[in-house]
Image: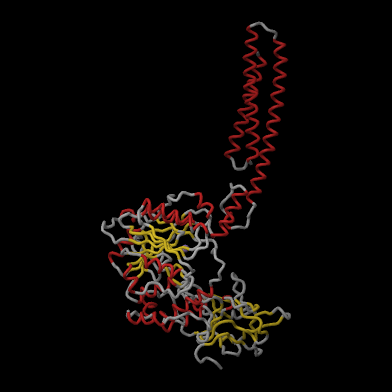
Amino acid sequence: MSICIYYVCVYSSLSSLSLLFAFFSSISSSFSSLLLFVSLSVSLSLSLLLSVSVCLSLALSFSQYYNTSISYHRVIMRKMLHRCVELSVRHILKSFTNHIKSHASKKLQRKLFPDTALFEKWGDNLTNAQQIQAFILFSLYGYNAYLSDHLPFNRSIPDTRPLRCLEKKYPQQLPTLSVVITFMDEALSILQRAITSIIHRTPSHLLKELILVDDFSSNEDLKVNLDKQIQLYNLKYPGLLKLIRHTERKGVASTRFSGSQAATADVVIFLDAHIEVNIEWAEPILARIREDHTVIVSPIIDNILFDTLEVNESPLMPMGFSWKLFGHYDYMSVNSKDNTIAIKSPAIMGIFAANRLFLEKIGFLDTGMLFYGGENVELSLKAWQCGGKIEILPCSRIAHLQRAHKPYSLIISPLMKRNALRVAEIWMDNYKYMVYLAWNLPLKNHGIDFGEVSSKIELRKKLKCKSFDWYLKNIYPNLMPLQHIVGYGSMKNSVNKMICLDQGNIQGNTPVMYICNGFKQQFVYYHLTGELYVGQLHAEIFSNDRCLTDPGEGWKPELVSCQEAILKRMNMYWDFKQGASITNKYTNRCLEVSKRSPVSHLLILQRCTGQKWTIQHTVRNWEI
Ligand SMILES: [Mn+2]
């Protein structure tokens, strides 16, 4: 009996010790999962032995009761204990090798597409087959369509509105709403989630119709399958959904135009298909347009991450654009006391709503735009210059999925350039040269066909729209026209015509000579007043153009923020004429090229040796 109690005590204390060890391993990050596993296994096996000992001790007592020989039982007990130890050791070894194997296979799974953005933060527990499927869908759509296919259409997303929005009350009587969703080669589940969110989060008496416009998708899923889904929706909500299909690709402006032509409600909103509307999104829009039918409104567009599809709140900021007419957030001050108040904005976001008749009156979007780019700036200028206004509403939130890459192979830069020139020609009067400068195009004979614009100019006259000068001064003072540019484009030296002045390493401030490539890093802008801007043109109050300066010592020229160079009175003014030297006005040193080898040239400052420079485009009669 005593030996049994001894075994019970030993095994129970050992197993409790192992369990304790396992517990500390699990809470301490310094212990590996392997240690945790081993200690758990040991504790389990010891518990097994413990229970065997308990059984044996009971059997022993039982046999003592019947006066059976103790020594006989001792032999049996020893044998059984040996067998138990042997089994436990085998069990531990087997589990241990299984653990190592599964660990190794997990590592292999993670490495299937290690360089793909999709798998950076997502997809750890997928099998190889699932990873391949997710990868293919990601390549097709530029977002995580695999995850989208596995999430419910009516998933909830965080309410990102400022808290004070929750206290707002909107009138019962609001204008009706037509929602237009335009799409091209979108994942069906993404489109269905957009539709579901709109149906669930818009009061049904306000939502008159949901118009889908397909800009000639090639995606099979969007054909028969989409038709079936629309039938199902319309069974539940009779007549709510309409589908228009283009038989050739027409671009964003024309696709939205097709939707607007089918719309019949008081207010029409244009959405992408990769969106989810948030709680009470429509009421602020409809209430504001009811107050003032000339205001075009955008919601705050929160961001759906392309990999995890989580929603991130966006800041309350108005929208602006660059001289290339690319939209970007602007840095105007926003009312800090009441963060629910509409934000006046120079431009619309990619999503906007307007009174349908007002939109029709100002000529809607310019359907002469191809593919996309520029159409939002065009509508923005038109709205402000022709008697309307643009506002962003902090209490209306729509989450929008930003693609990691565009799913179409088309090179869009030439089309964006062409569209930008249309906007410049129709709306920007004598400031249009800034768009040409930003795109590095000659003012005349640029050879770009931007299509017919005379009817648009005619409409502008008929509506008695204001000038772009008025717009810049009153609505968008952060965009600064440069008045004194006389030469721009690439800058070449007489030593070697194959190399161009280049801003050099992006992080660095030392300009270099580099093989001419026509990229923005090699754009140079010379002002009649002597400044030489190097690199992409900004000409906006809160962005940094960089000016070429002579530090006064050493041989290296430097690029410094132009504003900083003015404040610190740096040597930033240069004498230059087409085909002549570039000489610093203060130090009298010349910007020259030193040949290190047939292929390597240094850009240096030195006493002038008569090297000549030529700039790609010249303005006015600024020539020698
Ligand atoms: Mn979009």
Q: Is residue 280 above or below residue 478?
A: above
Which of the two residues, 511 or 294, is positioned nearer the viewer here?
Answer: 294
Question: Image quadrant for the C terminus?
Answer: bottom right
Q: How many marks?
A: 0
Residue 564 left/right relative to 10? left
Q: Position of residue 194 (x, y in %)?
A: 43, 56
Does residue 575 sit above or below 239 in this rendering? Answer: below
| Residue at x 54%, y 59% (from the top left corner) | 141
Residue lying furthest bottom in this view? 624
Q: Quadrant of the N terminus?
A: top right
- Residue 30, quarter of picture: top right
Q: Quadrant of residue 259?
A: bottom left
Where is 443 relative to 308, above or below?
below
Q: Position of residue 272 (x, y in %)?
A: 44, 62
Q: Position of residue 281 (x, y in %)?
A: 36, 57
Q: Position of residue 428 (x, y in %)?
A: 42, 80
94 and 603: which is toward the camera: 94
**Coloring applied to the structure:** secondary structure
Q: Nearer the viewer, residue 28 or 133?
A: 133
From the viewer's side, name the closer residue of 558 and 497: 497
Up-down: is 509 above or below 392? below
Picture residue at 70% right of the left edge, 13% below the top: 73
Residue at the extreme top of the image, as rendered:
67
